Amino acid sequence: MNTIFLLIIILLSAGFLFDLVLDTINLAHIQPDLPEILKDKYDSVAYGKSQSYLKEHGRFGILVSVLSFAAVFTMFLAGGFTWLNTFVYTLTHSPIWAALLFFGILGLLADLAGIPFELHSTFVIEEKFGFNKTTPKTFITDKLKSWLLALIIGLPLLALITWLYTLTGKWFWLLTWAIISIFSLLMSFFYSTLIVPLFNKQVPLEAGELRSSIEKMCKNAGFQLSRIYIINGSKRSTKANAYFAGFGSKRRIVLYDTLVNDMTIPQILAVLAHEIGHYKKKHIIGTMILSIAQSGILLFLFSLVVGNPALAKALNIGEPNFHISILVFGILYSPISMITGLFFNYLSRRFEYQADAFAGKLLLKKELGDALINLSEKNLSNLTPHPAYVFTHYSHPPLIQRLQKLN
Protein backbone atom coordinates (compact mmCIF):
# COMPACT_ATOMS: atom_id res chain seq x y z
CA MET A 1 0.00 0.00 0.00
CA ASN A 2 1.78 3.16 -1.15
CA THR A 3 1.68 6.55 0.59
CA ILE A 4 -0.83 8.28 -1.69
CA PHE A 5 -3.25 5.36 -1.57
CA LEU A 6 -3.00 5.33 2.23
CA LEU A 7 -3.63 9.09 2.26
CA ILE A 8 -6.74 8.59 0.08
CA ILE A 9 -8.10 6.02 2.54
CA ILE A 10 -7.34 8.28 5.52
CA LEU A 11 -8.97 11.35 3.93
CA LEU A 12 -12.05 9.39 2.86
CA SER A 13 -12.46 7.92 6.33
CA ALA A 14 -11.77 11.18 8.15
CA GLY A 15 -14.26 13.09 6.01
CA PHE A 16 -16.93 10.45 6.54
CA LEU A 17 -16.38 10.29 10.32
CA PHE A 18 -16.37 14.09 10.59
CA ASP A 19 -19.73 14.35 8.81
CA LEU A 20 -21.13 11.39 10.76
CA VAL A 21 -20.28 13.04 14.10
CA LEU A 22 -21.81 16.35 12.97
CA ASP A 23 -24.98 14.65 11.72
CA THR A 24 -25.29 12.70 14.97
CA ILE A 25 -24.84 15.65 17.34
CA ASN A 26 -27.17 17.76 15.20
CA LEU A 27 -29.84 15.07 15.41
CA ALA A 28 -29.37 14.81 19.18
CA HIS A 29 -29.61 18.60 19.51
CA ILE A 30 -33.29 18.69 18.43
CA GLN A 31 -35.17 20.24 21.35
CA PRO A 32 -38.57 18.88 22.45
CA ASP A 33 -39.80 22.31 23.63
CA LEU A 34 -40.55 25.28 21.42
CA PRO A 35 -37.89 28.01 21.91
CA GLU A 36 -39.07 30.82 24.19
CA ILE A 37 -38.65 33.54 21.56
CA LEU A 38 -41.19 31.81 19.30
CA LYS A 39 -43.81 30.63 21.83
CA ASP A 40 -46.36 33.26 20.85
CA LYS A 41 -45.49 33.26 17.13
CA TYR A 42 -44.96 29.65 16.09
CA ASP A 43 -47.57 26.94 15.72
CA SER A 44 -46.89 24.30 18.39
CA VAL A 45 -48.45 21.54 16.26
CA ALA A 46 -46.13 22.41 13.35
CA TYR A 47 -43.18 22.38 15.74
CA GLY A 48 -44.04 18.90 17.01
CA LYS A 49 -44.41 17.69 13.44
CA SER A 50 -41.05 19.20 12.54
CA GLN A 51 -39.35 17.20 15.31
CA SER A 52 -40.63 13.95 13.86
CA TYR A 53 -39.73 15.00 10.32
CA LEU A 54 -36.21 16.10 11.24
CA LYS A 55 -35.50 12.88 13.15
CA GLU A 56 -36.75 10.61 10.38
CA HIS A 57 -35.09 12.65 7.64
CA GLY A 58 -31.84 12.88 9.63
CA ARG A 59 -31.62 9.17 10.38
CA PHE A 60 -32.29 8.32 6.76
CA GLY A 61 -29.59 10.79 5.69
CA ILE A 62 -27.08 9.10 7.98
CA LEU A 63 -27.98 5.70 6.52
CA VAL A 64 -27.47 6.99 2.97
CA SER A 65 -24.10 8.56 3.87
CA VAL A 66 -22.91 5.31 5.51
CA LEU A 67 -23.84 3.25 2.45
CA SER A 68 -22.31 5.82 0.08
CA PHE A 69 -19.05 5.82 2.01
CA ALA A 70 -19.02 2.00 2.09
CA ALA A 71 -19.49 1.87 -1.69
CA VAL A 72 -16.66 4.34 -2.46
CA PHE A 73 -14.37 2.79 0.17
CA THR A 74 -14.94 -0.67 -1.32
CA MET A 75 -14.29 0.63 -4.84
CA PHE A 76 -10.85 1.82 -3.73
CA LEU A 77 -9.93 -1.20 -1.61
CA ALA A 78 -11.21 -3.79 -4.09
CA GLY A 79 -9.66 -2.03 -7.10
CA GLY A 80 -12.99 -1.11 -8.71
CA PHE A 81 -11.65 2.14 -10.17
CA THR A 82 -8.59 0.32 -11.48
CA TRP A 83 -10.78 -2.31 -13.14
CA LEU A 84 -13.01 0.35 -14.71
CA ASN A 85 -9.96 2.19 -16.07
CA THR A 86 -8.69 -1.05 -17.65
CA PHE A 87 -12.14 -1.77 -19.06
CA VAL A 88 -12.57 1.60 -20.81
CA TYR A 89 -9.16 1.21 -22.46
CA THR A 90 -10.30 -2.11 -23.93
CA LEU A 91 -12.98 -0.07 -25.74
CA THR A 92 -10.88 2.87 -26.89
CA HIS A 93 -7.31 4.20 -26.96
CA SER A 94 -8.45 7.82 -27.10
CA PRO A 95 -7.85 9.69 -23.81
CA ILE A 96 -10.93 11.81 -24.53
CA TRP A 97 -13.27 8.86 -25.01
CA ALA A 98 -11.64 7.05 -22.09
CA ALA A 99 -12.43 9.99 -19.78
CA LEU A 100 -16.02 10.20 -21.09
CA LEU A 101 -16.59 6.47 -20.64
CA PHE A 102 -14.93 6.39 -17.21
CA PHE A 103 -16.96 9.22 -15.67
CA GLY A 104 -20.07 8.43 -17.72
CA ILE A 105 -20.19 4.86 -16.41
CA LEU A 106 -19.37 5.96 -12.84
CA GLY A 107 -22.00 8.69 -12.90
CA LEU A 108 -24.69 6.45 -14.35
CA LEU A 109 -24.01 3.62 -11.87
CA ALA A 110 -23.99 6.06 -8.93
CA ASP A 111 -27.25 7.64 -10.09
CA LEU A 112 -28.93 4.27 -10.60
CA ALA A 113 -27.76 3.10 -7.17
CA GLY A 114 -29.23 6.25 -5.64
CA ILE A 115 -32.70 5.83 -7.17
CA PRO A 116 -34.09 3.55 -4.39
CA PHE A 117 -33.04 6.15 -1.78
CA GLU A 118 -34.55 9.01 -3.80
CA LEU A 119 -37.78 7.03 -4.11
CA HIS A 120 -37.91 6.41 -0.35
CA SER A 121 -37.13 10.05 0.44
CA THR A 122 -39.73 11.39 -2.00
CA PHE A 123 -42.57 8.87 -1.85
CA VAL A 124 -42.21 7.72 1.77
CA ILE A 125 -40.72 10.44 4.00
CA GLU A 126 -41.83 13.55 2.06
CA GLU A 127 -45.21 11.91 1.39
CA LYS A 128 -45.67 11.01 5.07
CA PHE A 129 -45.22 14.62 6.15
CA GLY A 130 -47.37 16.13 3.42
CA PHE A 131 -44.64 17.62 1.22
CA ASN A 132 -44.62 15.36 -1.82
CA LYS A 133 -46.53 16.31 -4.95
CA THR A 134 -44.24 14.43 -7.34
CA THR A 135 -45.95 11.74 -9.38
CA PRO A 136 -44.10 8.62 -10.61
CA LYS A 137 -44.34 10.06 -14.12
CA THR A 138 -42.71 13.33 -13.04
CA PHE A 139 -39.98 11.45 -11.18
CA ILE A 140 -39.13 9.37 -14.26
CA THR A 141 -39.21 12.30 -16.69
CA ASP A 142 -37.05 14.41 -14.34
CA LYS A 143 -34.50 11.61 -14.20
CA LEU A 144 -34.44 11.21 -17.99
CA LYS A 145 -34.12 14.97 -18.50
CA SER A 146 -31.21 15.16 -16.04
CA TRP A 147 -29.44 12.37 -17.93
CA LEU A 148 -30.09 14.19 -21.21
CA LEU A 149 -28.60 17.41 -19.81
CA ALA A 150 -25.53 15.46 -18.69
CA LEU A 151 -25.15 14.13 -22.25
CA ILE A 152 -25.70 17.50 -23.90
CA ILE A 153 -23.74 19.72 -21.49
CA GLY A 154 -21.66 17.70 -19.02
CA LEU A 155 -19.95 15.19 -21.30
CA PRO A 156 -19.07 17.68 -24.09
CA LEU A 157 -17.59 20.02 -21.48
CA LEU A 158 -15.49 17.16 -20.08
CA ALA A 159 -14.42 16.19 -23.61
CA LEU A 160 -13.33 19.77 -24.34
CA ILE A 161 -11.29 20.00 -21.12
CA THR A 162 -9.64 16.63 -21.76
CA TRP A 163 -8.82 17.66 -25.33
CA LEU A 164 -7.24 20.91 -24.08
CA TYR A 165 -5.07 18.88 -21.72
CA THR A 166 -3.89 16.58 -24.53
CA LEU A 167 -3.20 19.66 -26.66
CA THR A 168 -1.47 22.02 -24.22
CA GLY A 169 -0.30 19.84 -21.31
CA LYS A 170 -0.19 21.41 -17.89
CA TRP A 171 -1.08 24.86 -19.27
CA PHE A 172 -4.57 23.55 -20.02
CA TRP A 173 -5.77 25.02 -16.70
CA LEU A 174 -5.73 28.61 -18.04
CA LEU A 175 -7.92 27.81 -21.04
CA THR A 176 -10.15 25.58 -18.92
CA TRP A 177 -10.52 28.35 -16.34
CA ALA A 178 -11.61 30.76 -19.07
CA ILE A 179 -14.11 28.26 -20.50
CA ILE A 180 -15.60 27.38 -17.09
CA SER A 181 -15.85 31.08 -16.18
CA ILE A 182 -17.66 31.91 -19.43
CA PHE A 183 -19.91 28.87 -18.99
CA SER A 184 -20.78 29.97 -15.43
CA LEU A 185 -21.65 33.47 -16.62
CA LEU A 186 -23.82 32.14 -19.43
CA MET A 187 -25.62 29.82 -17.03
CA SER A 188 -26.26 32.75 -14.69
CA PHE A 189 -27.79 34.71 -17.56
CA PHE A 190 -29.81 31.96 -19.19
CA TYR A 191 -30.43 29.24 -16.58
CA SER A 192 -33.91 30.52 -15.80
CA THR A 193 -34.86 30.79 -19.47
CA LEU A 194 -33.21 27.63 -20.86
CA ILE A 195 -32.86 25.03 -18.09
CA VAL A 196 -35.74 25.73 -15.69
CA PRO A 197 -38.46 25.42 -18.41
CA LEU A 198 -37.33 21.82 -18.99
CA PHE A 199 -38.58 20.96 -15.51
CA ASN A 200 -41.08 23.65 -14.52
CA LYS A 201 -43.55 26.02 -16.08
CA GLN A 202 -42.94 29.73 -15.53
CA VAL A 203 -45.65 32.27 -16.32
CA PRO A 204 -45.57 36.06 -15.91
CA LEU A 205 -47.35 37.32 -12.82
CA GLU A 206 -50.73 38.65 -13.90
CA ALA A 207 -51.80 42.26 -13.36
CA GLY A 208 -53.48 42.77 -10.02
CA GLU A 209 -52.89 43.77 -6.42
CA LEU A 210 -49.82 41.58 -5.95
CA ARG A 211 -48.04 42.76 -9.10
CA SER A 212 -48.89 46.41 -8.38
CA SER A 213 -47.58 46.06 -4.83
CA ILE A 214 -44.35 44.45 -6.06
CA GLU A 215 -43.79 47.17 -8.68
CA LYS A 216 -44.38 49.87 -6.07
CA MET A 217 -41.98 48.25 -3.64
CA CYS A 218 -39.32 47.87 -6.36
CA LYS A 219 -39.68 51.56 -7.18
CA ASN A 220 -39.21 52.51 -3.52
CA ALA A 221 -36.10 50.31 -3.42
CA GLY A 222 -34.66 51.95 -6.55
CA PHE A 223 -34.80 48.66 -8.38
CA GLN A 224 -36.10 48.43 -11.94
CA LEU A 225 -37.83 45.15 -12.62
CA SER A 226 -40.51 44.15 -15.11
CA ARG A 227 -39.95 40.38 -15.20
CA ILE A 228 -41.92 38.78 -12.37
CA TYR A 229 -42.75 35.10 -12.80
CA ILE A 230 -44.70 32.40 -11.00
CA ILE A 231 -43.20 28.90 -11.12
CA ASN A 232 -45.24 25.75 -10.50
CA GLY A 233 -43.17 24.50 -7.58
CA SER A 234 -46.26 22.67 -6.31
CA LYS A 235 -45.69 20.20 -9.15
CA ARG A 236 -43.16 18.45 -6.89
CA SER A 237 -43.49 19.76 -3.34
CA THR A 238 -45.55 21.94 -1.03
CA LYS A 239 -42.36 23.69 0.16
CA ALA A 240 -42.19 27.38 -0.72
CA ASN A 241 -39.36 29.51 -2.09
CA ALA A 242 -38.44 32.53 -4.20
CA TYR A 243 -35.26 33.47 -6.01
CA PHE A 244 -33.58 36.13 -8.10
CA ALA A 245 -32.05 35.15 -11.45
CA GLY A 246 -30.09 36.73 -14.28
CA PHE A 247 -28.45 40.11 -14.81
CA GLY A 248 -29.29 43.26 -16.74
CA SER A 249 -32.22 42.86 -19.11
CA LYS A 250 -32.40 39.15 -18.25
CA ARG A 251 -32.91 39.60 -14.51
CA ARG A 252 -36.13 38.33 -13.07
CA ILE A 253 -37.76 37.43 -9.78
CA VAL A 254 -39.35 34.01 -9.61
CA LEU A 255 -42.01 33.19 -7.00
CA TYR A 256 -43.08 29.65 -6.20
CA ASP A 257 -46.84 29.26 -6.48
CA THR A 258 -46.74 27.70 -3.01
CA LEU A 259 -45.22 30.93 -1.67
CA VAL A 260 -47.96 33.04 -3.25
CA ASN A 261 -50.68 30.75 -1.94
CA ASP A 262 -49.34 30.49 1.62
CA MET A 263 -48.32 34.09 2.35
CA THR A 264 -49.95 37.47 2.62
CA ILE A 265 -48.97 40.20 0.17
CA PRO A 266 -46.89 42.08 2.80
CA GLN A 267 -44.99 38.88 3.58
CA ILE A 268 -44.35 38.23 -0.12
CA LEU A 269 -43.08 41.79 -0.50
CA ALA A 270 -40.72 41.28 2.43
CA VAL A 271 -39.29 38.09 0.86
CA LEU A 272 -38.78 39.93 -2.43
CA ALA A 273 -37.20 42.89 -0.63
CA HIS A 274 -34.72 40.42 0.86
CA GLU A 275 -33.91 39.05 -2.62
CA ILE A 276 -33.54 42.57 -4.00
CA GLY A 277 -31.20 43.29 -1.09
CA HIS A 278 -28.84 40.61 -2.39
CA TYR A 279 -28.75 42.39 -5.75
CA LYS A 280 -28.40 45.91 -4.35
CA LYS A 281 -25.61 44.79 -2.01
CA LYS A 282 -23.83 43.15 -4.96
CA HIS A 283 -23.84 39.76 -3.22
CA ILE A 284 -24.56 37.86 -6.43
CA ILE A 285 -21.69 39.42 -8.38
CA GLY A 286 -19.34 39.15 -5.40
CA THR A 287 -20.10 35.48 -4.89
CA MET A 288 -19.63 34.80 -8.60
CA ILE A 289 -16.23 36.53 -8.66
CA LEU A 290 -15.09 34.55 -5.62
CA SER A 291 -16.38 31.33 -7.16
CA ILE A 292 -14.49 32.00 -10.40
CA ALA A 293 -11.32 32.77 -8.41
CA GLN A 294 -11.77 29.54 -6.44
CA SER A 295 -12.12 27.49 -9.62
CA GLY A 296 -8.93 29.10 -10.96
CA ILE A 297 -6.98 28.14 -7.82
CA LEU A 298 -8.41 24.61 -7.99
CA LEU A 299 -7.41 24.18 -11.62
CA PHE A 300 -3.93 25.59 -11.00
CA LEU A 301 -3.33 23.15 -8.14
CA PHE A 302 -4.63 20.32 -10.30
CA SER A 303 -2.22 21.33 -13.09
CA LEU A 304 0.68 20.78 -10.68
CA VAL A 305 -0.15 17.09 -10.21
CA VAL A 306 -2.07 16.03 -13.33
CA GLY A 307 -0.31 13.21 -15.13
CA ASN A 308 1.98 12.53 -12.18
CA PRO A 309 2.94 8.83 -12.20
CA ALA A 310 2.48 8.72 -8.40
CA LEU A 311 -1.28 9.27 -8.83
CA ALA A 312 -1.51 6.37 -11.26
CA LYS A 313 0.64 4.20 -9.03
CA ALA A 314 -1.73 4.84 -6.10
CA LEU A 315 -4.43 2.87 -7.96
CA ASN A 316 -1.99 0.36 -9.43
CA ILE A 317 -2.30 1.80 -12.93
CA GLY A 318 0.71 1.70 -15.20
CA GLU A 319 0.44 4.86 -17.28
CA PRO A 320 -0.96 8.07 -15.74
CA ASN A 321 -4.04 9.51 -17.45
CA PHE A 322 -6.30 12.52 -17.14
CA HIS A 323 -9.41 10.94 -15.59
CA ILE A 324 -7.53 9.01 -12.90
CA SER A 325 -5.68 12.23 -12.02
CA ILE A 326 -9.06 13.96 -11.57
CA LEU A 327 -10.34 11.14 -9.36
CA VAL A 328 -7.31 11.01 -7.05
CA PHE A 329 -6.88 14.79 -6.92
CA GLY A 330 -10.55 15.17 -5.94
CA ILE A 331 -9.89 13.13 -2.80
CA LEU A 332 -6.54 14.77 -1.96
CA TYR A 333 -8.07 18.25 -2.42
CA SER A 334 -10.92 17.54 0.03
CA PRO A 335 -9.30 19.26 3.08
CA ILE A 336 -8.87 22.48 1.07
CA SER A 337 -12.39 22.08 -0.30
CA MET A 338 -13.75 21.85 3.24
CA ILE A 339 -11.97 25.05 4.28
CA THR A 340 -13.24 26.98 1.26
CA GLY A 341 -16.71 25.57 1.91
CA LEU A 342 -16.60 26.91 5.48
CA PHE A 343 -15.57 30.33 4.16
CA PHE A 344 -18.34 30.45 1.55
CA ASN A 345 -20.97 29.37 4.08
CA TYR A 346 -19.78 32.02 6.54
CA LEU A 347 -19.89 34.67 3.81
CA SER A 348 -23.34 33.51 2.69
CA ARG A 349 -24.70 33.80 6.23
CA ARG A 350 -23.36 37.35 6.48
CA PHE A 351 -25.01 38.18 3.15
CA GLU A 352 -28.32 36.83 4.44
CA TYR A 353 -28.17 39.14 7.45
CA GLN A 354 -27.39 42.09 5.18
CA ALA A 355 -30.29 41.26 2.84
CA ASP A 356 -32.60 40.96 5.87
CA ALA A 357 -31.43 44.40 7.05
CA PHE A 358 -32.12 45.84 3.59
CA ALA A 359 -35.71 44.56 3.74
CA GLY A 360 -36.02 46.02 7.25
CA LYS A 361 -34.98 49.46 5.98
CA LEU A 362 -37.89 49.32 3.53
CA LEU A 363 -40.16 49.21 6.62
CA LEU A 364 -40.76 45.49 6.12
CA LYS A 365 -38.98 44.25 9.25
CA LYS A 366 -42.08 42.77 10.91
CA GLU A 367 -43.36 41.35 7.62
CA LEU A 368 -40.02 39.66 6.91
CA GLY A 369 -39.98 38.15 10.39
CA ASP A 370 -43.51 36.83 9.86
CA ALA A 371 -42.55 35.49 6.43
CA LEU A 372 -39.49 33.68 7.82
CA ILE A 373 -41.61 32.10 10.54
CA ASN A 374 -44.22 31.13 7.95
CA LEU A 375 -41.59 29.51 5.73
CA SER A 376 -40.07 27.67 8.67
CA GLU A 377 -43.46 26.32 9.75
CA LYS A 378 -44.42 25.21 6.26
CA ASN A 379 -41.03 23.61 5.54
CA LEU A 380 -40.69 22.03 9.02
CA SER A 381 -37.26 23.59 9.43
CA ASN A 382 -34.90 22.86 12.30
CA LEU A 383 -35.22 25.68 14.87
CA THR A 384 -32.44 24.37 17.11
CA PRO A 385 -29.57 23.07 14.94
CA HIS A 386 -26.26 22.41 16.67
CA PRO A 387 -23.89 25.44 16.35
CA ALA A 388 -21.11 23.24 14.93
CA TYR A 389 -23.46 21.92 12.25
CA VAL A 390 -24.57 25.47 11.42
CA PHE A 391 -20.96 26.64 11.15
CA THR A 392 -20.05 23.75 8.85
CA HIS A 393 -23.10 23.25 6.66
CA TYR A 394 -25.52 26.20 6.83
CA SER A 395 -25.48 28.80 4.05
CA HIS A 396 -28.39 30.58 5.79
CA PRO A 397 -28.52 31.48 9.49
CA PRO A 398 -31.06 29.58 11.60
CA LEU A 399 -34.46 31.25 12.04
CA ILE A 400 -33.97 32.37 15.66
CA GLN A 401 -30.65 34.07 14.88
CA ARG A 402 -32.19 35.86 11.91
CA LEU A 403 -35.09 37.12 14.01
CA GLN A 404 -32.75 38.31 16.77
CA LYS A 405 -30.54 40.10 14.26
CA LEU A 406 -33.56 41.60 12.48
CA ASN A 407 -34.89 42.99 15.75
Image: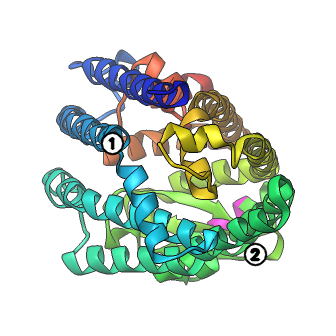
Q: Is residue 258 one of those drawn in magenta?
A: no
The answer to whether one can see residue 208 in this image is no
Q: Earlier in the sequence, mark 1 or mark 2?
A: 2
* Relative to 249, residue 355 above or below: above
Q: Which residue is mark 2?
A: 250
* Relative to 199, residue 70 above or below: above
> Is residue 384 toward the left or the right of residue 117 in the image?
right
Location of residue 336 in the rendering, given as x and y in whole percent from the top left corner? 65, 30
Q: What amino acid is labelled 1 in the image? A: Glu
Residue at 25 percent across and 33 percent down: it is 47
Q: Which residues are magenta?
A: 213-217
> Is residue 335 toward the left or the right of residue 299 in the image?
left
The answer to whether one can see residue 197 in this image is yes
Location of residue 387 in the rendering, given as x and y in whole percent from the top left corner? 46, 17
Along the viewing direction, whichever of 137 and 273 lies nearer the viewer? 137
Q: For marks 1 and 2, give the CA distance.
A: 33 Å
In the rendered view of the protein, which quadrant contains the N terminus?
Answer: top left
Location of residue 390 in the rendering, given as x and y in whole percent from the top left corner? 48, 25
Q: Which residue is mark 1?
A: 377
Location of residue 191 in the rendering, given as x and y in whole percent from the top left corner? 63, 72
* Relative to 213, residue 68 above or below: above
Q: How many marks?
A: 2
Along the viewing direction, whichever of 406 and 186 lies nearer the viewer? 186
- For residue 229, which quarter of the picture? bottom right
Q: Is residue 214 one of those drawn in magenta?
A: yes
In the rendered view of the protein, which quadrant contains the C terminus?
Answer: top right
Q: What amino acid is labelled 2 in the image? A: Lys
> Label 2 neighbourhood size at 10 Å, few (<14), some (14-19), many (20+)?
some
Q: Are marks 1 and 2 in contact (CB under 8 Å)?
A: no
